[in-house]
Image (spheres, helix red, strand yellow):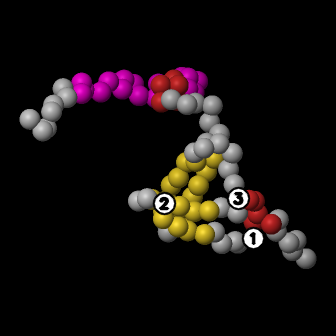
Amino acid sequence: MPTKPAPTEQPRTAKLFMDGGSQTVRLPRAFRFKGDAVRIRKQGDAVVLEPLTSKFTNTAEWFAELDRLNELAGEPFMPDGREQPAMPPDRNIFD
């Protein structure tokens, strides 16, 4: 006999409303996240929210960890490096 899913596994509804130019979802208590941000992505028609649990808070740390893991595999993550072209100088567009 199948077991009844936990309350957080049962489909629920959440309220939608506009906050300035953004759509906001009011999550029920059982679905709330810790922190002040979540990772968001589309998967087909679904929108997936994921907690930000990574210990890496900036891209330099993230790339360094990728390099470390790939060195264990015997090759660097980006063998040619990740040099970006210089940013163009700022310009005042209202002159």
Q: Amino acid at mark 3?
A: Phe
* Horizontal and vertical percent position of residue 17: 52, 67
Q: Which residues are magenta?
A: 65-88
Question: Cβ–Cβ below 8 Å for labels 1 and 2?
Answer: no
- The earlier-in-sequence mark between 2 and 3 is 2
Which of these two is toward me, 65 or 53? 53
* Horizontal and vertical percent position of residue 79: 39, 25
Closest to the camera, between mark 1 and mark 3, is: 3
Q: Main secondary structure of the magenta part?
A: loop
Which label is found at residue 19? 2
From the image, tell me which residue sits under label 3.
Answer: 31
Q: Residue at x 57, y 62 (%)?
A: 25
Q: Amino acid at mark 1?
A: Gln
* Horizontal and vertical percent position of residue 14: 63, 69
Neighbourhood count class around disc 3 (C-alpha, 10 Å): few under 14, some 14–19, many 20 upward = few
Neighbourhood count class around disc 1 (C-alpha, 10 Å): few under 14, some 14–19, many 20 upward = few
From the image, tell me which residue sits under label 1.
Answer: 10
